[in-house]
């Protein structure tokens, strides 16, 4: 095909092709000396923003970097400082870390009449306090604060108990918001997101293990079980659910907005706590995502019941996925997907909140870039796994974009429109907790790491907010009764407090059958019976070979109301939906053939493309 006859989208396809074949690019790779300079530049970026916050916004929650002012955005408790604590420790800044820990311990209180997001408060504030406590209280970290006496842990426990009323629902899935002084308002919405209900296990689990109170770990595990019990027959979960009825109010399944960190915390809860139940659910959920959502190298959103495509969109929150795949050991698709996502960044200088894969344009109404870290996070993990210099090149490009596009007088600004690089006067706390943290770790790893994560006394799991949670014996081994593979636990370790309905007592299933068990109300009071979190890891493989994973872990399956009395027992049929080459990037350098397919299929997409672009 001659150049004159090529479609306008070919330039973009070429960009994608080059991102998949970096050997064809002309950019020079980052040298060791340049990596050191880039690491130092990222450090300067952190302090430009951190000092800007401390000088102009503290103790308000967040910085307005253009006007050099502050604003309370979450609860009015120095959010950015709490979110930045472990980054200060990672950079080795003992003085500022110690001073910040001491100030927070003396001045922050949570007995305030504020209604806050359960999800955001957990990942930013509770996670920040716990991570800083684990660093400040441990000589082995090299950042022990001499005057520290568990003040942050005491604050974390107080905050955690104020969040517990959110879990008092019939399904165990929590409300999205809770008042720190009065609990859940009677008019509070009963609709929450899957990520909001399923991304609490790390912080609450660590809190339980540090203070020796299982209630926090119990309620968050019940929330995960409540969501997973209501998965579709395809093992997909939707985006929003009613926490009282368990009915899905939005059935779009994907790996991005409203669902993303549900997948993330399944795997990370297993990595941190060693709880095989989370691993099992992750394996089932991940397999379904790769089967129904993956259109190599992109991911789309589908109906959770039929797998019909409803949203051919890349949204920026999907960019965490390649990093998660690295942790799961699935490197090859991670490399391809990261390359596709990176090509969007390189086209605009940033990743927009939404990029339409049918029209290959920025999605209307989703043109902003709020300093998100997800693509940088995946870049770090892929470099750590492969040591491929292309990821250092990507990091260098990202630094250039942030420095030239988002730097403001007192910090770094949101981009309101990636096509025109218009700045917006806001800086989320996660810029300091995650964005610069992953960039710094990337280049410090290239230079020869000398930091707490790579050279410290523990292996660390990063929370979804980028907080460092160490796999210490107190956290990771508290529930291990048997230390050798194949060993058998004491009989008393096998007792479980799971409650099933009478109708389920007679049910017996083969190893390959579908799970179906009764579901009971989860309550938050520590005086009431809930699932016993100490009974899982004692069940060593081979103890009861006739049990399915669902029976072994007490996992339920709740059928939709209309199917409760007569559900299908046959294997679900493969979904019938048309796949479009317009959402698949070239993996072979056969441009003529690809463009023919793209042109032919492009018209077939109008049935759903019109809904997406409107």
Image (cartoon, rainbow, N blue to C red):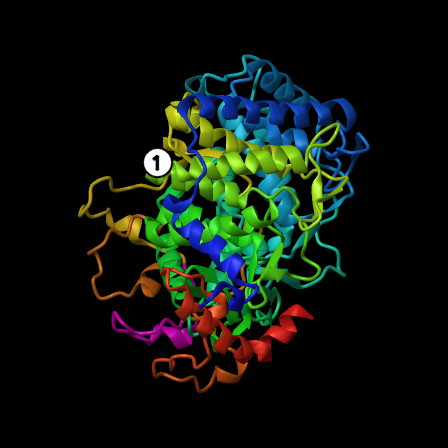
| Residue 428, picture quadrant | top right
Q: Is residue 355 above or below residue 96?
A: below
Q: Residue 102 in the image: x percent, y percent?
A: 64, 19
Mark 1 residue crowding within 10 angstroms, few (<14) / some (14–19) / many (20+): some
Q: Closest to the observer: 398 or 571? A: 398
Q: Closest to the observer: 47 or 241? A: 47
Q: Is residue 151 above or below residue 122?
A: above
Q: Which residue is mark 1?
A: 387
Which residue appears farthest toward the bottom when viewing the image?
A: 566
| Residue 606, picture quadrant | bottom right
Taking the magenta stretch, the answer to whether it contains residue 437 is: no
* Residue in view at x 68 percent, y 21 percent: 103
Q: Is residue 528 visible?
A: no
SS under mark 1: loop
The kind of secondary structure the magenta stretch mainly shows is: loop
* Residue in view at x 66 percent, y 29 percent: 81
- Looking at the figure, which quarter contains the C terminus? bottom right
Which residue appears farthest toward the left when viewing the image?
A: 486
- Looking at the figure, which quarter contains the N terminus? bottom left
Q: Is residue 270 above or below residue 503?
A: above
* Residue in view at x 33 percent, y 65 percent: 551
* Residue in view at x 61 percent, y 39 percent: 124
Left or right relative to 188: residue 469: left
Residue range of the region highlighted in magenta in the rendering: 498-516
Q: Residue 485 in the image: x percent, y percent?
A: 20, 45
Q: Residue 51 in the image: x percent, y percent?
A: 69, 22
Q: Is residue 357 above or below residue 30?
A: below
Q: Residue 419 in the image: x percent, y percent?
A: 68, 51
Q: Is residue 404 visible?
A: yes
Total marks in image: 1
């Amino acid at each position: 095909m001659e150049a004159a006859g090529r479609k306008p989208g070919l330039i973009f396809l070429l960009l994608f092709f080059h991102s998949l074949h970096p050997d064809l690019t002309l950019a020079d790779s980052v040298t060791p000396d340049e990596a050191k300079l880039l690491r130092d530049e990222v450090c300067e970026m952190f302090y430009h923003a951190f000092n800007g916050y401390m000088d102009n916004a503290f103790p308000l929650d967040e910085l307005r970097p253009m006007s050099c002012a502050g604003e309370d955005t979450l609860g009015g408790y120095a959010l950015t400082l709490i979110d930045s604590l472990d980054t200060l420790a990672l950079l080795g800044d003992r003085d500022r870390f110690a001073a910040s820990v001491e100030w927070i311990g003396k001045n922050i209180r949570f007995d305030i009449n504020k209604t806050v997001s359960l999800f955001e408060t957990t990942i930013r504030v509770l996670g920040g306090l716990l991570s800083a406590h684990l660093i400040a209280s441990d000589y082995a970290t090299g950042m022990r604060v001499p005057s520290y006496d568990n003040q942050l842990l005491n604050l974390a426990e107080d905050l955690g108990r104020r969040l517990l009323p959110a879990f008092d629902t019939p399904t165990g899935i929590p409300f999205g918001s809770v008042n720190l002084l009065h609990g859940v308002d009677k008019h509070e919405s009963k609709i929450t997101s899957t990520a909001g209900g399923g991304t609490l296990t790390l912080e609450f689990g660590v809190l339980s293990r540090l203070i020796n109170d299982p209630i926090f770990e119990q309620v968050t595990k019940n929330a995960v079980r409540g969501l997973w019990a209501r998965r579709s027959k395809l093992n997909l979960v939707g985006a929003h659910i009613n926490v009282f009825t368990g009915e899905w109010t939005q059935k779009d399944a994907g790996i991005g907005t409203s669902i993303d960190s549900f997948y993330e915390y399944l795997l990370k809860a297993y990595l941190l706590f060693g709880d095989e139940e989370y691993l099992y659910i992750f394996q089932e959920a991940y397999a379904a995502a790769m089967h129904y959502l993956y259109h190599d190298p992109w991911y789309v959103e589908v109906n959770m019941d039929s797998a019909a495509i409803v949203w051919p969109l890349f949204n920026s929150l999907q960019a965490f996925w390649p990093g998660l795949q690295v942790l799961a050991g699935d490197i090859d698709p991670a490399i391809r997907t990261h390359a596709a996502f990176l090509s969007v960044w390189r086209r605009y200088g940033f990743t927009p909140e939404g990029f339409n894969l049918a029209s290959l344009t920025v999605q209307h109404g989703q043109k902003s870039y709020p300093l998100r870290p997800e693509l940088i996070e995946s870049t770090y993990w892929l470099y750590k796994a492969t040591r491929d210099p292309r990821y250092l090149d990507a990091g260098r490009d990202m630094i250039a974009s942030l420095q030239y596009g988002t730097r403001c007088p007192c910090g770094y600004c949101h981009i309101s429109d990636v096509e025109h690089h218009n700045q917006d006067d806001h800086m989320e706390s996660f810029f300091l907790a995650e964005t610069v943290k992953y960039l710094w770790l990337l280049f410090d790893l290239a230079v020869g790491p000398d930091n707490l994560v790579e050279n410290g006394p523990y292996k660390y799991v990063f929370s979804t907010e980028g907080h460092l949670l160490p796999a210490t014996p107190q956290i990771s081994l508290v529930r291990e009764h048997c230390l050798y593979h194949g060993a058998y636990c004491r009989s008393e370790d096998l007792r479980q407090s799971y409650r099933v309905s009478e109708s389920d007592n007679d049910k017996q299933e083969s190893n390959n059958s579908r799970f179906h068990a009764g579901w009971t109300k989860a309550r938050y009071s520590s005086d009431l019976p809930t699932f016993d979190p100490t009974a899982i890891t004692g069940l060593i493989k081979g103890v009861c070979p006739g049990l399915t994973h669902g029976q072994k872990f007490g996992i339920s399956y709740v059928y939709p109301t209309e199917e409760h009395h007569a559900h299908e027992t046959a294997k679900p049929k493969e979904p019938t939906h048309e796949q479009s080459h317009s959402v698949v990037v070239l993996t072979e350098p056969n441009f003529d053939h690809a463009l023919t397919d793209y042109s032919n299929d492009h018209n077939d997409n109008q049935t759903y493309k019109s809904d997406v672009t409107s």
